Amino acid sequence: MPANNLAEKVASLRFLFNPRSIAIIGASQNPAKPSGQPLIALQKNNFPGKIYPVNPRYQELRGLKCYSALKAIPEEVDMAIIAVEVSAVLEALEECGQKGVKAVVVFTSGFAEVGGKGIKLQKEMTDLTKKYKFRLLGPNCMGIFSARNSLWADFPLMDAPEDILIPDYFGFITQSGGFGCILYEVIKAQRIGFSHFVSTGNEADIEFSEIIAYMADDAYTKVIGGYMEGVKDGTLFFQAAEKALEKEKPVILIKTGRYETAARAAASHTGAMVGSDRVYDAFFRQKGIIRVDSIDELTALLLITAAGKIPRGNRVGILSASGGTGVLLADKCAEYGLEVVSLAEETQEKIKNLLPDFASYANPVDLTSAIVPKPGLLYECAHVVSADPNIDALLICFYNLGVNEDILNQIIKAAKASEKTIVNIVWGDENICQKQIRYLNDQFVPAAREMGVAVKALSNLIEYNSRRQLFLQEKSVSPVPLKAKEDVATILAKIAPTAKLTEEEAKQILKTYDIPVTEEEIATGPEEAVAAAARIGYPVALKILSPDILHKTEAGGVKLNLDTPENILAAYKEIITNASAYQPDAKIKGVLVQEMLPAGVETIIGISRDPVFGPVVMFGLGGIFVEVLEDVVLRVVPLTKSDAYEMIEEIKGRRILDGVRGQSPVNKSAIAEVILKVAQLAQDFPQIKELDINPLICSDKGVWAADALIVLQ
Amino acid sequence: MPANNLAEKVASLRFLFNPRSIAIIGASQNPAKPSGQPLIALQKNNFPGKIYPVNPRYQELRGLKCYSALKAIPEEVDMAIIAVEVSAVLEALEECGQKGVKAVVVFTSGFAEVGGKGIKLQKEMTDLTKKYKFRLLGPNCMGIFSARNSLWADFPLMDAPEDILIPDYFGFITQSGGFGCILYEVIKAQRIGFSHFVSTGNEADIEFSEIIAYMADDAYTKVIGGYMEGVKDGTLFFQAAEKALEKEKPVILIKTGRYETAARAAASHTGAMVGSDRVYDAFFRQKGIIRVDSIDELTALLLITAAGKIPRGNRVGILSASGGTGVLLADKCAEYGLEVVSLAEETQEKIKNLLPDFASYANPVDLTSAIVPKPGLLYECAHVVSADPNIDALLICFYNLGVNEDILNQIIKAAKASEKTIVNIVWGDENICQKQIRYLNDQFVPAAREMGVAVKALSNLIEYNSRRQLFLQEKSVSPVPLKAKEDVATILAKIAPTAKLTEEEAKQILKTYDIPVTEEEIATGPEEAVAAAARIGYPVALKILSPDILHKTEAGGVKLNLDTPENILAAYKEIITNASAYQPDAKIKGVLVQEMLPAGVETIIGISRDPVFGPVVMFGLGGIFVEVLEDVVLRVVPLTKSDAYEMIEEIKGRRILDGVRGQSPVNKSAIAEVILKVAQLAQDFPQIKELDINPLICSDKGVWAADALIVLQ
């Protein structure tokens, strides 16, 4: 889907977020029912537009004229909320279409999430949105509120908070209404203001990704959050994620399905198609989406971002009021990839002058209990350490028996004076902690109760920032000339669709994209094989050539290191016999005579098509590593150069590429090049369903595709 | 160290926990100083014994006669608290010794933790404890309190809590005084009573492990906790851990140093010798010690154990008030190894009758918002699900806008009626959560705010319980007859101490312990090699035989698959040439002619000596797996049978042992046997410093030590 399509989609959401008039179809006077709540909320929050209750049972509702039907409303209606029985929904939508309504919110359940007939009903619903060109939120959703627009088209009644620290800050999207409501209450209690809250339900029309894109464009929303079980359209998600990166709106998601069991539960919970979580996880990393596992982590991120300072790197200083606490905190930093570096000598000198003999001046700095009696000491230490050029951020962990405002004020003073992020961990009795945390947060000095939560949040934010910098610097460009694409198109045009290509055909395609392949020739008889070997040079390998045999080694169809004509003659015979025994109906085209490559590390590069994200590139170490340890890494196409390099560094066995047992390190740039070219192939040719280069032999001199498999769809 | 030694040590701690009289040497009238605090605390908490302040500056302190010196006290003194300057400590200890004091607590800092002269001072301190046979806590510690004995020999002033849910429940030991104080406040706020609190400081005499053993014996303490940076004596720790297992006292530790950086910080914080964290971690698993990463996890465990029900297995049911929440919780369960199983059909039927159409009856059970309006519904559902025979424990995640006592009472009613553990996760505004959690905990119905914390705690407890059952069922017994030990002793007696053994010698030792080794003979010349091959049977391998060459392959000293006399003659010559070139001064004894083994999986089994724990057995997959992925698992000797089997299942690449690429699964029992025998060798012969069987070839038919290395110390 082209990006301008996304822009169009976003533009069409205008009336969902900011309607001038709202009809509530099925409006009820019962405040306990979803159908009774939007009217109360709209009135209470002074919605500036017109409100039209629609229900033939009432003449009037809460002081407003109640209409018998939508068409009875004399004026234009921008938004309709539908809160009628499932059997009456489609008719109501027809009426909306005829009335020219622009945005519809459907609370009603009983569609795709119940399966069977519900799926059919939902399909008809989607068709109606296309017929009448209105946008639809839901069904089976809790609606939307948009604080700045005083729009509360949702249930249950969510109170607008009275005491907001930072208004219109956070935009939230949820695929579970219930979870969204809980999250709203938790975040609200931290006094972080919501710009918008959107419950997308079954997504019969409006998708999660569109709302991300809308919020990325929105001037007020600074951070976007969400609860996601899965998206239907990976391309749209890709574009929305890039838009959010571009506009510097961090996207923080709670995504279920990290473990298979849970993914199954999610599948039964909504009608969304849930792709493999591994692909989602790779995509999140690729596009700087921060994945969190709890509401606490999300809250910590909101508080740190609200302070407005993003650390430039991952080097941290630690100040603690007990040695043991400092050590624990250093442990957490190591766990989440933050470096507890040595402080500059000058800093250490200054600390030595400030602190008594038994404190530790190294990083972590142990303030001991000296901070309590000595006025201003904590500020001095925090000031000195945060100014150290060796560190990018400062972590302070302290403990108070009571709410000691003097201690807190010292921290606030140091934080205000520093251009670096200072994150606090406050320990002790929960009640007292909460008060202290609130005191600090009131001044935009981020604080949390749990070390792991604070450190992980800081680390995630640093990772987000570096990802964003990379994104701004580079765009994905084709690593091959247009001519190559045309040539491959010609080759593919000659092959029957849905065919498995022979190794030779597959390699020809790779070669056209300038991917190094082993030198080789086809031989249809033993003497031809000997002649080919003479041209290629001894020793050679012989491999069975058959579109029907995918696993050549298993079929006994591979012979290596053949160094004489006699050996070749014998091997030829054996291979043909083995292959015929292995699969009697296999079409055998002969053998491939192949140069023997220098010893190297076997890797594997492949393409598969994900039902959500489309083409996905895989890289890993070959053989047992991929089979047993599943030591592979994924990225969604298209890739940038840094994506390719990151893939190589992300495998667990990466040390093998750096050279073990006295071997030279392999040429990683050459691997990255192949990854990029394979990704480009996937992008250029949707008919390539699967591609495997296995193995890609890697040495210090270069890389060679020793075997290749392409399956068309 | 024999176990009766531990019993003696524990007995000698009697006066530390329950002295009849206490002298405070250096007692001060300043309540802000450590020297001023014990007297206040002892008086406030009505210590039943005698208190003798000692300080020549006062005649009287807080209504008590103050003595000029310890010897001036006319009666017996069981305990002395030393709170004088570092320069006066040794003299005070001399006086304690002469007076016959039984237990000394040293607050004073400035010993091993400052290095240099401090280390020497501490050594003299340890010597005095031996000379006078008193026990010493510290130095550089915050002392001890023992609630039941009204003993408060500590600083800073820790208030005995007024409102205790469960008195004398938790015994805590800390190597960081500051961290211990923080933890005390946090746990106290949860109203869990401490039986004892011991800050061990530098451990010049009394060690962490002794206190564990004391608390294991203590009738009141039900759970033992600790903050640990490292122990000095692994054997003592081993015995103490087993005693705690035997007495059913879970040991829950926060242990620093999981990551290297943090371990370095810990090393600079105390004088304790910190061993490799990997060994600690293996040991914890081996002996059922629960390792936690935060105080919250510890608190959750205390609350769950206090409910008095330990789940028999890891199958859980989930009840949640929102579908999304249930999915998230299922994710967490998968992460921590709990199984979200299908409920019995009968249970599903019952739930269906209780819940409206749109809820989910599978596990997780989605109660939807139906629980609020329908009285008693939550109880009914919890009751039905907890009674399901398919599950061992129930997790309930709910959310209330206010403190809804009716909802809470339903949960309590269900929990009381069930013999299974019901753990609650309460979400929402922190303030309200806290009140709800307290309401539940008051009734011993465990509740926490964070999913991850609750699920991990439950999982840890289940793991602890299964570990304890195993411990009760089996004891480690020698897998070899006494005769084997005598024979190896004879072999070793012939070899010079500290020597590296030849492969042949090493294999002879393994063979004596009935570990299968490759059939082989020594040959000192090429013709001898040919003759040996004829006896062993072709094909054979030739390997250089030299005590000076440890890495034979690197030295070009190995030739495989030799199938003719000619090949053997050539290989012999080449090996000798290579080895001489590789290490000209190497003493070459000839070659080993060895049977070629069937193809199999290469594993590695070894012994090393840990500075803390002594002999440690390692098992892993050989080759690149051990070198690059460090896919190895450790256990501390002695091992039980289940330890050996667990080691095999714990490696990441375990699937290789089950047979990949069409191979048969290897004989795991045979591997376990070798692990046990190697462990026994380590236990029987302290002079074996290192042992490596690399590779141990494993197939479905058996295992063979193809190469072996033994280094004596």
Image (tube, coloured by chain):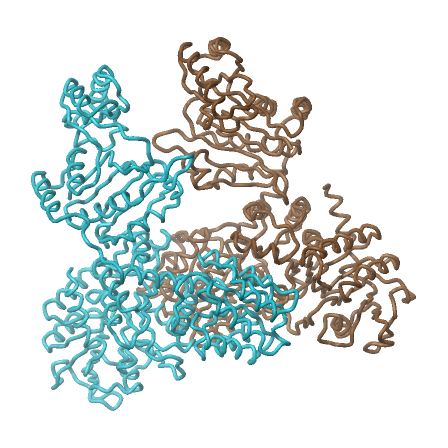
Chain colours: A brown, B cyan
Viewer-closest of A615 and B229: A615
Residue A698, x across and y down, in percent = 46, 28
Q: Nearer the viewer, residue B559 or B153?
A: B559
Image point (33%, 57%), residue name: B285
Give me the residue at 61% from left, 70% from top: B353
- Give the image quarter of residue B690: top left
Above or below for B512 versus A427? above
How many numbered marks have been drawn onto this rendered protein structure? 0
Q: Position of residue A275 (x, y in %)?
A: 60, 47
Residue at 24% x, 36% y is B705
Q: Quadrant of the N terminus of chain A?
A: top right
Q: Nearer the viewer, residue B32 or A214?
A: A214
Q: Position of residue A212 (x, y in %)?
A: 67, 53
Horizontal side, residue B49 vs residue A619: left or right: left
Side (left or right) of B711 relative to A368? left
What is the quadrant of residue B706 in the picture?
Answer: top left
Indicate the quadrant containing the C terminus of chain A: top left, top right, bottom left or bottom right: top right
- In the displayed structure, A580 sits above or below A262; it is above
Q: Is residue B644 visible?
A: yes
Q: Position of residue B467 (x, y in %)?
A: 32, 60
